[in-house]
Image: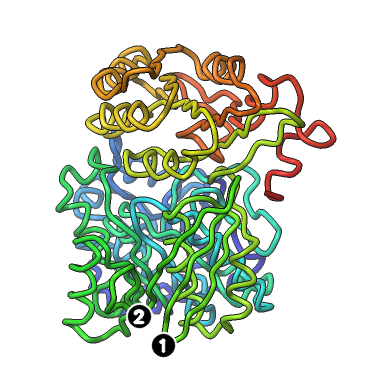
Amino acid sequence: MTSIRPTETTAAPLTELVAGLGLVGDIGSSTLITGISLSSQEILPGWLYVALPGRQRHGADFARAAVDAGAAAVLTDDEGAARLTGLEVPVLVAGDVRAAMAVVSARVFGEPARRLTTLGVTGTNGKTTTVALIKAGLMAAGRVAGTIGTIGFGLGGEELNSSRSTVTTPESPDLQALLAVMEERGADSVAVEVSSHAMALSRVDAIEFDVAAFLNLGRDHLDFHHTLEEYLAAKSRLFEPGRARTSVVWTDDSAGVEIAGRVAGHGQSRLITAGTGPQVDYRMSDYRPVHPLGGVATVTRRGEDLTLELSLPGVYNMIDAVVALAMLEAVGVPVEAALRGLATAQIPGRMQRVHLGPDAPLTVVDFAHTPQAVEAALRSLQGIGTLVCVLGCGGDRDAEKRPDMGAVAARLSDVTIITDDNPRSEDPAAIRAEVMAGARRAQRPGTEVLEVPGRRAAIETALGRAGGDTVVAILGKGHERGQILADRTVDFDDVEEAARAWGRGGEEGDPHARAHDV
């Protein structure tokens, strides 16, 4: 991502920025720092360069370039320090360089999280939706709310980054800078998607959230965490002492029960439980779909029944809304404002309707890229008409989930079209074969499973055979506006491709034009 920085940063003595961190090295009593980055290409005079180990090279290999660009000091680990010789600036060594970087980053930007109301959300599925719902509730209450997550960084109705982020939760220097920018521009609240990578890599270590929430645990990112146990451990770090003043936990699965038990055990965070069971603080019941894309449910809390309406389909989105409601009330948002904001919220690429004109099939684009998310999305669309699903799996990611995703799609769809997602460095045909294997095993009598190379061709196939009583679900990429190939990223937007394939767009020729007016 291209870094976003506040217009002004007060120069701070390096000695103050690293105080109490136990770093080794000659700090230099007169060294002043005005910024921080782990990219040597972004360094400006007076900044601190953080040299981290990478997949192929160590950041220390670029320290000379950083110093030549004006870096006033270097922070690194033992391996990096061993590579650094002859630098004319202080070199500081940390046992846990990422944890140290998080603290220093917060200090460089004046610890903005202390003055903002911060709401963090973690879970395999639903983070983006929940953060968007939180923002809608905050804005309905008159708050100036920012968001940080998968679909970018926003403040009110403004998008802060021109090119979309490639990570859910930015590295700590970028994250703290974003918080500072949002505060500078008048924000009083920020909702943050907190990924398992962010927890494992200490990106949010210097933030104590006003409220943090756990949604669910499913199969994803095992290319990074290796096992579900490691994955849960990373998620659980958000609920350790000192991480959040209030913890909202959806307890309908064993992971939620375990996390709620940990929070109750240490007693240093107020615990709010949510779920469908009788003993939770926010109980969801009586969910009813409102077609074509919406739902309503009863939420019982403190002995009072509330009617929660949502302009998004599916029980899974309503679950996210219940968690968002609990979080909003935890930070003082009046329930009337929260319900009003939740009722009208829409999220790009999350069950987003593509408006194709009269007599067109109901066409929906969604980011579902795990077996659980695919199942939730397709179940929410059943019963409306013939269900056609377009699905692919990303390359260079957890390969073991591919057959499961194909199986879920084939089990729940009338027509399943397996195609490409972001193949990255892998052979697209090999990825499709793995997804097809699962789809073929789960295919029901009277249904179809097709393999169509090329995502554009697959969308054309789906819409070419669709009529007014058809529902087309294009899953996997959601809000993304590019397709990642082995050697390049090409422009690709599922919403625009669907409109082109149908032959006409939404109002004024823009398929996005009424995508938020469902």
The residue depicted at 57 percent of the width and 53 percent of the height is 290
Q: Is residue 94 visible?
A: yes
**Depth check: 483 or 185 in front?**
483
- Other-residue count near label 2 (Cα within 10 Å), few / some / many at <14 / 14–19 / ≥20: many
**Depth check: 133 or 380 in front?**
380
Query: Against 270, is 1 above or below?
Result: above
Q: Closer to the N terminus: mark 1 or mark 2?
A: 2
Q: Position of residue 381 (x, y in %)?
A: 49, 40
Q: Position of residue 76 (x, y in %)?
A: 29, 55
Query: Against 99, is 508 above or below?
Result: above
Residue to which mark 1 is pinned = 302
Q: CA distance from mark 1 to mark 2?
A: 7 Å
Q: Quadrant of residue 48?
A: bottom left
- Other-residue count near label 1 (Cα within 10 Å), few / some / many at <14 / 14–19 / ≥20: few
| Label 2 SS | loop
Q: Position of residue 225 (x, y in %)?
A: 21, 46
Left or right relative to 133: residue 374: left
The residue depicted at 57 percent of the width and 69 percent of the height is 180
Q: Look at the numbered discs 1 and 2 and tell me whether their residues touch, using CB distance below 8 Å.
A: yes
Q: Which mark is residue 239?
A: none
Left or right relative to 149: residue 337: right
Q: Type of residue at label 1?
A: Arg
The residue depicted at 23 percent of the width and 78 percent of the height is 263
The residue depicted at 21 percent of the width and 81 percent of the height is 264
Q: Type of residue at label 2?
A: Asp
Q: Position of residue 288 (x, y in %)?
A: 49, 58
**Depth check: 152 or 251 in front?**
251
Query: Against 87, is 141 above or below?
Result: below
| Label 1 SS | loop
Residue to which mark 2 is pinned = 281
Q: Is residue 169 visible?
A: no
Q: Quadrant of residue 163?
A: top right
